[in-house]
Amino acid sequence: MPGLAATPWYDEGDQHGADFAAAVNGAGDVNGDGYGDIIVGAPKYTASGYPGGTAFVYYGAVSGLPLQPQWTTGGDILGSRFGGAVNSAGDVNGDGYDDILIGAYEYTIPDVPFVSHQGRVYLFYGSASGLGSDEADWTFAGDCADENLGYAVASAGDINGDGYDDIVVGARRYEQDDKKVGAVLVFYGSANGLTQIAPDWMVIGDDPGADFGTAVNTAGDVNHDGYDDIIVGAPNYDNGQEVGGAAFVYYGSATGLNPAGTPNWMAHGGVAEASFGMSADTAGDVNNDGYDDIIIGAPRYPGSADYDGAVFVYHGSSSGLSTSANWTAVPDQLGSLFGYAAAAAGDVNNDGYDDVIVGAYRYNDNPEDGQNSIEGAAFVYWGAPVQLQTTSWRAVGEKAETEFGFAVGTTGDITGDGNQDIIVGAPRYQRDSKTILGRVYVYFGQQNDFEWPYQTYLPLIVSE
């Protein structure tokens, strides 16, 4: 069966406890050479004497990825968690080169008394030679204590159809009227890139403690109107279900997002403490009907065992997103946190249907032996006519307690072979029992038949 290659590329951190690969993503194509690049965050990494966090970028090539990162930059504020969120920004200035975003959600603005951990987001422009200086081309910081601006960062696609990609930023603990309600900020791209000192659009949560903005991403174009949409997760949202969580989608238009900040679509977790919305992303077009779909993770959703976790896929259509999930998967394992990370995988087997990837970083590969090794796992589900397939490809962590699958994503086509590739982070990977270095893994998509590296995984499908 076509799918993903058995042997991954990987790189390992070089500092104990730096949380290398706690955040991983595709970086787009920052040097315009036709090969996808990747970005890896290590939010506790010490650079230049400051344990402020660091991000690493690797450039793709026909031969794959290099053994060492080709571009690195770090935070200069103690404990800022620079690299806690990393992502492609798309091409915000329309120069043909993709740009990158890095969040430092615990950043504290220097010399501002009694205010700390506002958070900050950094933008770096791509070019023919790749990323340039380690000095950001644009930054934006939060303005209230413990705001956590930059906890999530992403390209928003082109929301207003002006030819420039836009970005979306989550500030999950934004405060209004002395209540931590969370907020989401959007900045529109232009020929000059990003120059704003205030967001072009901002929506503030309406439920204190909901962590609105924990997940932000493009939703793709779910109604196929030519304008990209955004998705927001609030995993502790209370809708009378004891913080079951919620997700919200806002549709783009020629004038941008709705100034009133009213969501065009909303879904709830349905059960208490499900953490629905912990992850939320476009799913691409999994059924190839011309409309983009979305995927939402609920890592504490109770399936056949308490806190199994679950993922939900909603299909797009001419009228927007479906009102109920079109496909749902729940693993048969207690406490695996399946869905803590969930994202589009691209079309890894080049069959015309987009696929999705799901992380379960507490997954135990040997429960039948009475072990509790919790290596973690990542699962890819193939797109198909009508809906996603129930079978999947699976990879598990190489050692116990690696947190493999803590972060997952798509990388684009790293080698230029026509197949999309995927990336998985394992921030607790241990070189030995005392040295926790973390690892990032990339699995390359392929069309050719291959021997499955792990058994086919059959989840419990609770709705179709």
Image: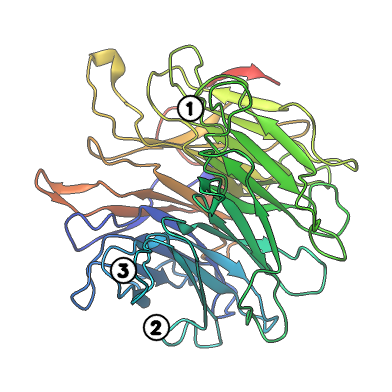
* Quadrant position of residue 248: top right
Mark 3 or mark 1, earlier in chain:
3
Where does residue 202 sit, x and y in percent of width and height?
67, 59
Identity of the residue drawn at 36% across and 63% down: 116
The residue that mark 2 highlights is 134
Q: In this view, does 129 lie above or below 398?
A: below
Q: What crowding class fits label 1: few (fewer than 14 Cα within 10 Å), some (14-19), or many (20 or more)?
A: few
Residue 17 in picture, x, y percent from top left: 20, 54
- Quadrant containing the N terminus is top right
Instruction: List the residue tagged with mark 3.
Output: 67
Kind of residue indicated by mark 2: Asp
Which residue is drawn at the image coordinates 51% and 68% (left, top)? 101
Pointer 1 residue: 456
Q: Which of 2 and 95 is in front in this view?
A: 95
Residue 117 lies in what quarter of the image?
A: bottom left
Disc 1 residue type? Thr
Is residue 454 among the parts visible in the rendering?
A: yes
Q: What colouring method underlies this structural image?
A: rainbow
- Whole-angstrom CA distance, mark 2 to mark 1, is 43 Å
Location of residue 154 with respect to 131 vertically, above or below: above
Residue 64 on image: x %, y %: 44, 66
Labels 3 & 1 near each other (Cβ < 8 A): no
| Closest to the observer, 123 or 399 | 123
Say what secondary structure mark 2 lies in. loop
